[in-house]
Amino acid sequence: IIDSHIHLADPDRLSYPWMAGAPQLRRHVVPADLKAAAAPVTVESLVFVEVDVADGQQVAEARWVDGMAASAKPGEPRVAAVVASLPLERGTAISSDLNQLLALKSLRSIRRLIQNQPDPDFCIRPDFIAGLKLLAAHDIAFDICVFHHHLPNVIRMVDACPEVRFVLDHIGKPAIREGLMEPWRSDMTALAKRQNVWCKISGVATEADHKRWTPEQLRPYIRHAIDAFGFDRVMFGGDWHVAELAIAYPRWIEVLDHVVADAAADEKRRLYRDNAARFYRFAA
């Protein structure tokens, strides 16, 4: 497996204000811990995704993980790519920080959390779009992390930046807990028509009731995301260690395996391995 969405953390080195609301996640997390949590599943490589550190620590976080990418330990999952954080809403003023990140060999994408912004138009403001457009010249992608109700503006954002490559995290965080399919289903179908957008099959159980979800609840959401984007533009993500709030790593594999049981072997390989390497531009 190549996991397209893994979080690593070091609370002694970096500050994670949001973890005050999830203290069980506030711990040191490195590839060796992922290896232990995933067993008996073997994760060969991973894509690190930023963990919403305190403002001003984004470059330091990326440098810390880039150091792990350069010094992989035998038998542990390899950090193959880094998704760093940048405050894109500052527009072209982020150029200096972006240049520092571009010096890191493992940098492949930027993420700026949209899901927790009080302004519903946050991602379509002119400065945010200007910041996004800086990425295209360097073939740096953008990870979209939103809730389902943000999807109409996500489509507007994507349409404003056709030169940027995007990947939607966590299938757009549908309202699984409430049992709602629409308008998420229709919005996903519309977003998938944009060929520069891919989708991570990740973070699904955490959008259901953490203690009482069932595979049958998750299945239609996973199935629609895969059907909308097709096996050429979906990639597996463990969303570990955040996913521990609702599901263990091997159990998530079991759930997804059942959903794609009727898929061809090459389709499963693209989902679980090849597409992450293709999108994030590293050798599988």
Image (cartoon, rainbow, N blue to C red):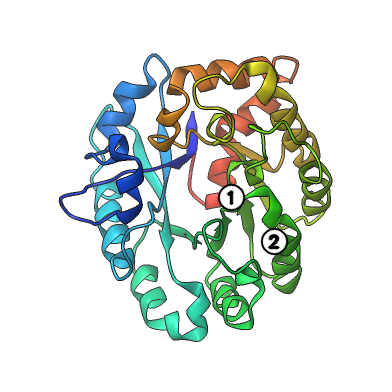
What x and y, as percent, mark residue 26? Answer: 26, 41
For disc 1, the marked residue is 279
CA separation, marks 1 and 2?
19 Å
Determine the secondary structure under disc 2.
helix
213 versus 32 height, above or below:
above
Is the residue marked by circle 1 packed among few (<14), some (14-19), or many (20+) residues within 10 Å?
some
For disc 2, the marked residue is 154
* x 53%, y 43%: residue: 277
Observer able to see residue 47 = yes
What x and y, as percent, mark residue 64? Answer: 24, 55
* Residue type highlighted by circle 2: Val
Observer able to see residue 260 = no
What x and y, as percent, mark residue 139? Answer: 56, 66
Instruction: Classify residue 104 by image quadrant.
Output: bottom left
* x 60%, y 71%: residue: 122
Of 75 and 166, the residue lying toward us: 166
Point out the tag, 1 or 2, that comes first from the N-terminus: 2
* x 52%, y 82%: residue: 91
- Say left or right for 140 vs 263: left
Is the residue marked by circle 2 packed among few (<14), some (14-19), or many (20+) residues within 10 Å?
many
- Say left or right for 98 vs 178: left
What x and y, as percent, mark residue 170? Answer: 59, 42
- Say left or right for 283 vs 24: right
Of 65 and 69, the residue lying toward us: 65
Instruction: Classify residue 134 by image quadrant.
Output: bottom right
The label nearer to you, 1 versus 2, is 2
Determine the secondary structure under disc 1.
helix
* x 36%, y 60%: residue: 105
* Residue type highlighted by circle 1: Phe
Of 101 and 274, the residue lying toward us: 101
